[in-house]
Image (spheres, rainbow, N blue to C red):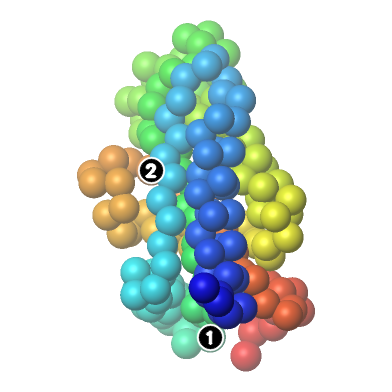
Amino acid sequence: MIYNEKQMEEKAVLETAAKMCAAARTSPKTKGVDNIVTVVLTGKEKDELADKMEEVYLREFGETEGHYVRDGRNLRTAGAVVLIGVKRAYTGLPHCSFCGFKNCGENKKMGGRCAFNTIDLGIAIGSAVSIAADNRVDSRVMFSIGKVAEEMNYAEGEDIIWEGIPISVSGKSPFFDRVKK
């Protein structure tokens, strides 16, 4: 059987995305509590997220061009996007106050977020992008993708903080020399 370059590049993107999800899952967690969630989007679903990015930017900023729009263009050129998120949970120490509140109960009452969970999200993202780099697949962490993903129902009603990592195999990284057009 002969596989052309496009087929092999698509396979590399999906295999790398799977490894990135595994790296996020197995990354170290504060207190050993796993609240990480991963999702991979390709094709139509990926493009729907890019469409939503433009919609959200227009709604929030009243402009037709901006960083969400630019990032949406980058997302369209990517082979896939790996979404890594963390569930809202209050698994810190009752007395740590890393979150800025007196204790976990006050944090929860005020609708805050546990600092341990956001630390875990950062560690998971670092583990995932290192996999992309090790596999020579271009990537870029984009908060804009994550922010818009919060409006999509990728985790069936869970309250998730998302970050998006589009990945690409191409002659030049689409995430380099990015400019607003």
- Separation of marks 1 and 2 at Cα, in angstroms: 27 Å
Q: Which of 159/19 is in front?
A: 19
Q: Is residue 95 visible?
A: yes
Q: Which x, y percent locates residue 178?
A: 70, 79
Q: Circle 2: is it few (<14), some (14-19), or many (20+) Cα within 10 Å? A: many
Can you name the residue that lies furthest to the left here? 157
- Asked which secondary structure carries label 1, the reply is loop
Q: Is residue 122 visible to the viewer in this orientation of the structure?
A: no
Question: Are the residues flagged by discs 1 and 2 in contact, CB closer than 8 Å?
Answer: no
Residue 147 in percent (x, y) is at: 45, 58
Q: Is mark 2 on a helix, strand or loop?
A: strand
Image quarter of residue 16: bottom right
For residue 65, the mark is: 1
Residue 21 vertical position relative to residue 73 in the rendered view, above or below = above
Residue 160 circle label = 2
Where the C terminus falls, by quadrant?
bottom right
Vertical order, 106 against 47 (above or below): above
- Given this view, does label 1 or label 2 mark the residue nearer the observer? 2
Residue at the front extreme of this rendering: 1
